[in-house]
Amino acid sequence: MRFVVRVAVNAFAIWIVTLLPALQVRLIPFAPGEGLQVLLTLLLVGLIFALVNSIVGTVVKIVAIPLYILTLGLISLVINGFLLWLTAAITGNWDWGLRTGEFWLTVVAALLIGIINAVLGGILRPRRDERARG
């Protein structure tokens, strides 16, 4: 259930970031219909972004522990930008998906996605005491 919430929150956060044209992040929808196209594209990109964060992100963050210490955690901005860029590279193999522009704008987009994920994730994810009861 938590992964489904994470995918939905990622999709919403990516949609919010795509509304800001200065960040040069855009979605290329596919066939069914405009509203459904955007929804399906966002959910698929959110799923791929969640998988990239879960698999690749975990490995990169463990390997980069010395850089976290040296930069007092600021390297996380670059790592999150890299993970967003990697998601765009994966979805770039198809006619739909996430497209990014300049790397540093991708880092800013990743920062905004992280903030949105933190806020919405804190609101929507079930808390430990609620999971123990249910």
Image (tube, grey):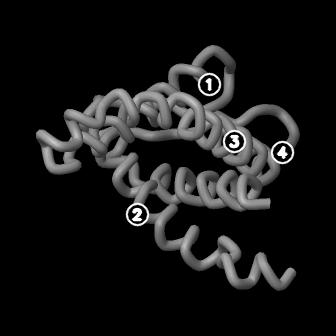
Q: CA distance from mark 4 to mark 1?
A: 20 Å
Marks 1 and 2: in contact by CB < 8 Å?
no
Residue occupied by mark 4: 33
* Sequence-first disc among 1 and 3: 3
Q: CA distance from mark 3 to mark 2?
A: 18 Å
Residue occupied by mark 2: 115
- Vertical placement of residue 89 versus 69, above or below: above
- Crowding at dot 4, Cα within 10 Å, few <14 / some 14-19 / many 20+, comes out as few
* Sequence-first disc among 2 and 4: 4
- Amino acid on which the number 4 mark rests in the picture: Gly
Residue occupied by mark 1: 91
Q: Quadrant of the C terminus?
A: bottom right
Discs 2/1, front:
2
| Depth order, front residue of 102/5 | 5
Residue occupied by mark 3: 47
- Crowding at dot 1, Cα within 10 Å, few <14 / some 14-19 / many 20+, comes out as some
Q: Secondary structure at mark 4?
A: loop
- Vertical placement of residue 9 versus 103, above or below: below
* Sequence-first disc among 2 and 1: 1
Q: Residue furthest left?
A: 70
The residue lying at 69 percent from left, 41 percent from top is: 47
- Vertical placement of residue 123 versus 78, above or below: below
Place of residue 41 in the rendered image (x, y in percent of width and height, measured from the top left): 71, 41
- Amino acid on which the number 1 mark rests in the picture: Thr
